[in-house]
Image: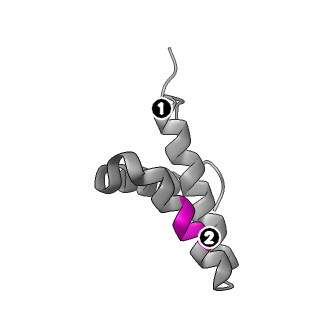
Amino acid sequence: MSEQDPDVWRVAKLVMERHGDEASAHAAAKARDALASGERDDAVAWTRIYEAIESLRQGLPGPGDTVH
């Protein structure tokens, strides 16, 4: 899964819809829990989702977005 993976952005948007202002905290907690459980791949995925959420909150474009 790359940083520009569209699935990461889709999940980030879903997490934001479901968790609102707590989306970043939710993704960070999922990453920590995965890491603590030894699930490195899941921890990496949730870290990327967290980063995508932060980018979306800052209004930065995601993959497929056009910049004018």
- Residue 53 lies, in percent from the top left, at 50, 46
In the depicted structure, whether residue 32 falls above or below residue 52: below
Kindly identify which numbered label has been placed on residue 65. 1
How far across and down, in percent of the image, does residue 3 sit?
65, 51
Q: Amino acid at mark 2?
A: Arg
Does dot 2 land on a helix, a strand or a loop?
Answer: helix
Q: Residue furthest bottom?
A: 37
Name the residue at 62% across, 59% down.
47
Identity of the residue drawn at 49% across and 25% down: 66
Q: Is residue 61 left or right of residue 23?
A: right
Asked whether residue 19 appears in the rendered view, the answer is: yes
Q: Main secondary structure of the magenta part?
A: helix
Q: In what quadrant of the picture does the N terminus appear?
A: bottom right
Give the residue at mark 2: 32
The answer to whether residue 64 of the structure is visible from this angle is: no
Foreground residue among 43 and 63 = 43
- What residue do we see at 30% from left, 56% from top? 18
Give percent across and percent down for residue 59.
48, 28
Residue closest to the eye, 25 or 8 = 25
Report the magenta residues as a range: 28-32
Which residue reaches farthest left?
18
Classify 6 as above or below 38.
above
Gap between marks 2 and 1, in whole Å?
Answer: 30 Å
Give the mark toward the camera: 2 or 1: 2
Q: Amino acid at mark 1?
A: Asp
**Up-down relation of residue 39 to residue 54 (above or below):** below
Disc 2 residue crowd, few under 14, some 14–19, many 20+, Cα 10 Å:
some
The tally of labels here is 2
Could you tell me which secondary element the residue under label 1 belongs to?
A: loop
**Residue 42 lies in what quarter of the image?**
bottom right
Q: How packed is label 1: few (under 14 Cα within 10 Å), some, or many (20 or more)?
A: few
